[in-house]
Amino acid sequence: MSSLIGLLDIILHLDDFLLPVIQEYGTWTYGLLFLIIFIETGLVVTPFLPGDSLLFVAGAFAGVGVLDIKVLIPLLLIAAVGGDHANYWIGRHLGDRILAWDNRIIRPKYVRSTQDFFDRHGKKSIFLARFVPIVRTFTPFLSGLGHMNYVEFAKWELAGSVTWICLFVGGGFFFGNIPVVRDNLTIIIILIIVASFAVIGLEVLRQYRDQLSKRLRRH
């Protein structure tokens, strides 16, 4: 429980934790950011790592010149794409074995919710999943497990990763240092997390509305 609270504290106060890291390790910070973004979607056992909020805060630091936006965006894009592709091939070659492991490591409910998401939205789920924490970790894994066409996966994944990185890093870069945003960064991060989960909620509501409309037309 204490470790969960500690992780939540880091996620909600990334501005406090990231600056000392930058001051202490300098350019090595880029390597740390790359690693976090890569393994957040590259390994099915790390869906809890910060994604959206980390990108926003990193973009905000780039906005004041502490980090270089010209390095940050391509580096994190490579991390995001590389993580997804690694997870796809892990799922394709090792998926059945991994799912047979101790389910305390890979929660079945995460797999089921991601599979439901994938079943509802088909190929476009690869794009949409980029904006939904936890789901984005399991979607490439299940795509590989289900032997989804690799070219189709790569196409939708690249579109999602480019949009995700540019949206959140760019958002932090342009808006993260506006006084009202900077002074309420914890609230902004919470809103980002809530908005990320809202993506799947809106899609579920849309699907429900469409199904309801079809039933009404039949009657």
Image (cartoon, grey):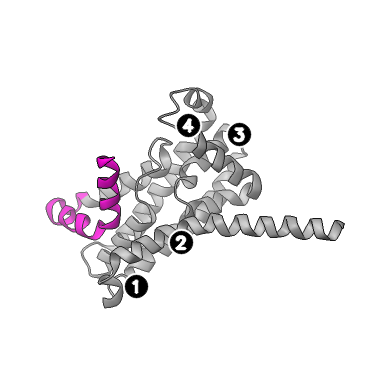
Q: Dot 4, how many residues are within 10 Å of its Cα: few (below 14), some (14-19), or many (20+)? A: many
Work out how far the residue at label 1 is from the one at label 4, CA to CA, in angstroms. Answer: 36 Å
Q: Which residue is mark 4?
A: 90
Residue 97 drawn at (x, y percent): 49, 22
Name the amino acid type tagged 3. Gly
Name the amino acid type tagged 4. Ile
Left or right of 12? Residue 107 is: right
Work out how far the residue at label 3 is from the one at label 4, CA to CA, in angstroms. Answer: 12 Å
Query: Which residue is situated farthest in the left direction here?
Result: 24
| Residue 6 within the magenta-colored segment of the rendering | yes
SS class, disc 4: helix
Q: How many marks?
A: 4
Which numbered disc covers residue 195? 2
Residue 89 drawn at (x, y percent): 50, 33
SS class, disc 3: loop
Q: Which residue is mark 1?
A: 174
The residue positioned 29% from the left and 76% from the top of the image is: 180
Compare marks 3 and 1 and give the one earlier in the sequence: 3
Work out how far the residue at label 1 is from the one at label 2, CA to CA, in angstroms. Answer: 19 Å
Q: Which residue is mark 3?
A: 146
Name the amino acid type tagged 2. Ala
Q: Dot 2, how many residues are within 10 Å of its Cα: few (below 14), some (14-19), or many (20+)? A: some
Which numbered disc covers residue 202? none
Foreground mark, 2 or 3, reads 2
Comparing 210 with 52, the one in front is: 210
Q: Which span of residues is magenta-colored?
A: 1-28
Compare marks 1 and 2 and give the one earlier in the sequence: 1
Comparing 128 with 187, the one in front is: 187
SS class, disc 1: helix
The quadrant of the rendering that contains the C terminus is bottom right
Work out how far the residue at label 3 is from the one at label 1, CA to CA, in angstroms. Answer: 40 Å
